Image (cartoon, rainbow, N blue to C red):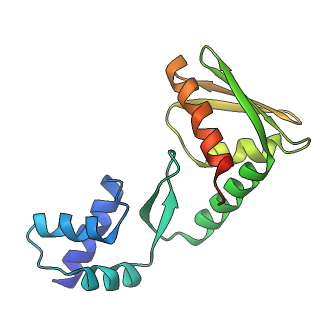
Amino acid sequence: MKYSRHSKILELIEKEKIETQEEIAEKLKELGFDVTQATVSRDIKELRLIKVMMEDGRYKYAPFTPAESVISNRLLTIFAESYVSSDYANNIVVVKTLPGMAQACASAIDSMKWTEVLGTIAGDDTIMIICRAEKIAEEMVNRFNKLANKNI
């Protein structure tokens, strides 16, 4: 029973953006599992689940992957500390960073693996990002402002 519950938890957090233990417990109950919040808490600990930042600045549960997680969090910290401003024209976003930090910030953006980003090009203090559509570019500027204003 425990292993099938663990398997279902991993499946749920892969398919959905689950932010709380209560959400996990609720979803499991909907699927016929008799669980309490304490059981879910133990499962999270046993599965070594962590909370990772989503594109909108909220956090969700994800499996712990040591190398990738540490690198991504460090890159996000570098981004937040180096970000100066951003703006867009059509489907192109231009990000200004502190001098010498554009390549590290572009790497942070790439590590987020946003499907709406076609690619990034970085210079010394400027990044050019090609998005799939103008509306996405506008939303991306808002995301960057939220990320930079968060204490990661």
Identify whether 118 is placed above or below 91.
below
**Residue 6 image position (x, y, % from top left):** 27, 76
**Residue 13 image position (x, y, % from top left):** 34, 61
**Residue 94 image position (x, y, % from top left):** 73, 26
Taking the spot 19% from the left edge, 66% from the top edge, the residue there is: 26
Taking the spot 33% from the left edge, 86% from the top edge, the residue there is: 42
Left or right: residue 14 versus residue 5 is right
Tally of numbered discs: 0
Foreground pick, 15 / 125: 125
Taking the spot 70% from the left edge, 61% from the top edge, the residue there is: 74
Residue 33 sits in which quadrant?
A: bottom left
Identify whether 143 is placed above or below 88.
below
Q: Is residue 133 visible?
A: no
Where's the N terminus, which quadrant? bottom left
Where's the C terminus, which quadrant? bottom right
Identify whether 49 is placed above or below 57.
below
